[in-house]
Image (tube, grey):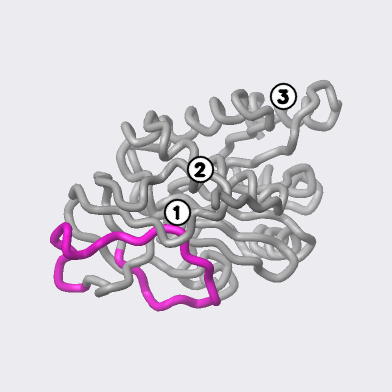
Amino acid sequence: MTSRFALVLATLCSGAQAAQFNVLVFSKTAGWRHDAIPAAVKAIEELGRQHDFNVVATEDAGAAFNDQELSKYQAVVFLLTTGDILNAQQKAAFERYIHAGGGYVGVHSASDTEYGWPWYAKLVGHMFEQHPAIQTAVLKVEDRNFPGMDGFAKRTLVTDEWYNFHPAASKLNYLLTVDETSYQPGPKGMGTFHPVSWYHDFENGRAFYTALGHLPASYGDALLRRHLFGGMYWAATGKGFRAE
């Protein structure tokens, strides 16, 4: 366990800081490693200070993924994770955490993680298949009545790495889609309905995912930060929001 991780855990246990909820940010990679990870962690830490919730960031699966430590958090963010990042015992602890009512937030390549874990595929909702080059495209709102969605225009230009996904592994509520006629999706586009962000109740817990966030500079964008906070807020508290 890193000294910084131990220090923040001790703070959570002591109750020294009153906060709305606690979030674990997990950014371990066993495949492609995104350059955006430092900027993404910093952005979530700043959101925590702005919205009064505690943030613990780690890549130490052994320290974090056990029943005792996971019980300290209301939501766990898989932030730009890739590959097989948890062992069998850690997976079992995370399954128990969600079954006990915990929240999950997946960001971008969280869908490019743990392909051999069927339970995780159901939690995420869609698994990554492939992507074309980074491009500017039209992002479309499918549902504004969710935390953080009130900042989006009905249609807006966004630059990102637009993931194509395998078919859904769960019944999902879709928040954002991308208009494939506005960019070059490559040979394996998804057609007229191309999801980008969604959420669903899963077992006794909650799961939110967004494919946005490939570029480091994106984490300085107030719109993406609002979107991420909305997902974390809902995953941690279960509280909804109506924009209209």
Dot placed on the residue nearer the N-terminal end, 1 or 2? 1
In the rendered image, which residue does mark 1 sit on?
210
Asked if the magenta segment contains residue 178, the reply would be: yes
The residue range painted magenta reads 164-188
Report helix, strand or loop for mark 1: strand
Q: Nearer the viewer, residue 138 or 72?
A: 138
Look at label 2 and name its amino acid: Leu
Labelled pair 1, 3 in contact (Cβ < 8 Å): no
From this viewpoint, which residue is outermost toward the right? 14
Dot placed on the residue nearer the N-terminal end, 2 or 3? 3
Question: In the image, which disc is placed on residue 228?
Answer: 2
**Above or below — where is 46 with respect to 207?**
above
Residue at x-position 22% and y-position 52%: 137
Crowding at dot 2, Cα within 10 Å, few <14 / some 14-19 / many 20+, comes out as many
Question: In the image, which disc is placed on residue 7?
Answer: 3
Foreground mark, 1 or 3, reads 1
Which of the 4 image quarters holds residue 111?
bottom left
